Image: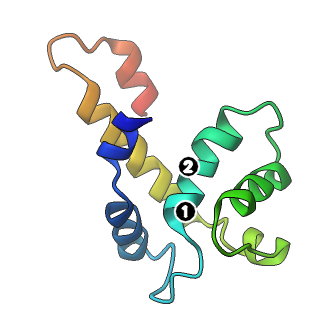
Amino acid sequence: MRRLTTLFPSEFLEDHAEFLGVVERDRRLQMPAFVWAFVFGFAAGESRTLAGFRRSYNSTADETISTGGFYHRLTPSLAEYFRDLVETVLDEVAVPDTVDADINRFRE
């Protein structure tokens, strides 16, 4: 967990989301809570439903988000945002001489 929060400080998560148009300046959606709810509460959890993802977010964020507001956020720019985060992790943890073809296929 510490390694991930070092790779992705809250300010980076917020600024990158704003840059890609995932959120607007009002920042009603708390991107750090959204990302960590996705990583730890949804992607790694037993219940992998969008409703479960929203519940996970609402349990960690300071301000809850309605069902409609949550589904409204599931956009192509959000997919691009998560794709960029995965690329960042792969670039950070991959040692250039030891990366095999499986990692390159995963990138694609």
- Is the residue marked by circle 1 packed among few (<14), some (14-19), or many (20+) residues within 10 Å? some
Q: In this view, does 105 lie above or below 79?
A: above
Q: Quadrant of residue 9?
A: bottom left
The type of residue carrying mark 1 is: Leu
Q: Is residue 39 above or below residue 105?
A: below
Which residue is painted at 30% across and 11% down in the image? 100
Camera-side residue of 97 and 52: 52
- Secondary structure at numbered mark 2: helix
Figure quadrant of the N terminus: top left
Q: Quadrant of residue 64?
A: bottom right
Q: How far apart in space, not on screen, are marks 1 and 2 (Cα)?
A: 14 Å
Q: Mark 1 points at which residue?
A: 78
| Residue at the bottom extreme, as displayed | 26
Instruction: Indicate whether 105 appears above or below 88.
Output: above
Quadrant where the C terminus sits is: top left
Residue 35 at what x, y percent from top left?
Answer: 54, 53
The answer to whether residue 6 is left or right of residue 58 is: left
Image point (57%, 64%), residue name: 76
**Picture quadrant of residue 60:** bottom right
Picture colour scheme: rainbow
Amino acid of disc 2: Trp
Quick one: label 1 or label 2, which is nearer the N terminus? Answer: 2
Q: Which of 101 and 55 is in front in this view?
A: 55
The number of numbered badges drawn on the structure is 2
Residue depth check, mark 1 versus mark 2: number of the one nearer the observer: 2
**Residue ID at (58%, 42%):** 39
Apparent side of residue 62 relative to residue 16 in the rendered image (left or right): right
Q: Where is residue 56 in the image (x, y as percent from the top left)?
A: 74, 52
Image coordinates for residue 4, horizontal then vertical, percent: 39, 39
Q: Where in the figure is residue 11, as x and y percent of width and height?
A: 33, 66
- Local secondary structure at mark 1: helix
The residue to which callout 2 is attached is 36
